[in-house]
Structure formats: structure tokens, C-alpha cells
Amino acid sequence: MDPKSVERWITTNRTPHRGHRWKAASFLGVDEVYLWPTVEKRAETASTSELVTYYPHRGAVPASLWSSLIEQASDQVEILVYAGLFLFDSHPDLPDQLADKAKAGTQVRVLLGDPDSPMIRQRGEEEGIGDDLAARARITRRYLEPAAQTPGVEIRLHDTILYNSIYRFDEDVLVNPHVLGAPAGQNPVLHFRYIPGARTFRHYMRSFDYAWERGRTA
């Protein structure tokens, strides 16, 4: 974040763009309305306000939505999965897109399951695909290797018990809950959009940060 921009926010009482507000508030560990009280706490802070829509399974998410979220992201792209191979298979240029975005200043963080961890082996057994899940995680990691050479693209491995896959693009996040015994693709997807003062978006992103801090460099 540019120190001169921060100085202007303070000296001119300027309210920055929402993406910058989110980054500053996240860095300081506070809600953005604490830093900028003039930001309206809308009535949409009700429990369902952030929910854009619900999909009964991952295949029901329109391909056009994935594409538009990827293309329009300019501040942050954050992905937490075991493999997430479907996204790279359906968007073969995604590694290049992530690298280009990082060069333009977008923060890109991707967390993949450690294929050698007992957690990913257990999940593979629970989903009925055995070692295939670990193999898929290795393929995704291989896809991302060229992009990982770009400053601003960070790839880490995790060995957590993953309750949700998370796909964050700026102020939109797609959450794919994991249902015991079912592959991720058969489970629902929830589309949330960040609203100042509301809770759900920030709740899931804190979960991402928790996993990120415990991950290791790929």
C-alpha cells in the first residue's frame, strides 16, 4: 500500500476505495467502519444480506460467473482448496491471468492441499476416490508453477481438515461447503458479497487467513 495514499487519507479526510479500505482494516485487525465512521452501515447487515445467491452444486455455478470474477478482480484473489483442479481445467489461461494480475498489483494467494498429508488421503477415502485427490492436488500445483515465479503470486500447501473451499475475488467470495462422503463438486456453493459492517464475508476470510498462516511455501 502506497504510504503517500495513506497520508492523503489522513490529511484530507478522504475515504479510500472499498478495496483499499478492506486491506487497511484487515492489516490493522479492525472493522473498516472503525477507521472510516462515515462509511454507511447499511441495513443489509441482516443475516442474509451478503448472500448473493445459492447453487445446489458446484456445476450449477455459471461458467460466465467464474470467468467474470476472475477477469474483474484487481485487488485480491485468494483460493483455499484441496485441489481445485476443475477451475484450472476450465480456465487453462488462469495461471497466466494470475501472474498478469500480480504484476499489476493484485495480491494472489493460493492454498493447496499437501498431497502427502494424512488429511488429503483421508478426504480422498471419504469421497471414494482414494489417492486420486492427492494426484489432482499435484497436477494443480504443477499448473501453478510458472505463475509462482511471479512476485505477488504466493502458493502454499496446507494439511488442515478443510470444511469449505473458498474462492475470493475482491469483494466476492464463492464458498463450497464440504459434505462428508460427497465430492466437492456435488456440494452446494454460496456466493457472498462484502458489505461494510456485515459479518459473513469477513468470517470466511478469517478462516482463509487462519489456514494461510499455518501453510508452508509450496
Image (cartoon, rainbow, N blue to C red):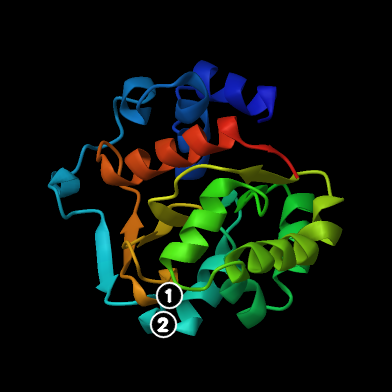
Residue at 17% across / 44% down in the picture?
45
Image quadrant holding the C terminus, namely top right
CB atoms of marks 1 and 2 within 8 Å: yes
User: Is 206 left or right of 115, judged from the image as shown?
Assistant: left
Residue 9 in percent (x, y) is at 52, 24
Residue at 27% across / 77% down in the picture?
56
Name the element at disc 2: helix
Three-letter residue code for mark 2:
Gly
User: Is 34 left or right of 162, judged from the image as shown?
Assistant: left
Alpha carbon separation for disc pair 1 and 2: 7 Å
Q: Nearer the viewer, residue 8 or 79?
A: 79
Residue 158 in percent (x, y) is at 60, 43
- For label 1, the residue is 185
Name the element at disc 1: helix
* Residue 99, quarter of picture: bottom right
Residue at 65% across / 73% down in the picture?
88
- For label 2, the residue is 59
Q: Residues within 10 Å of mark 2 (few under 14, many from 20)?
A: some
User: Is 6 left or right of 33, judged from the image as shown?
Assistant: right
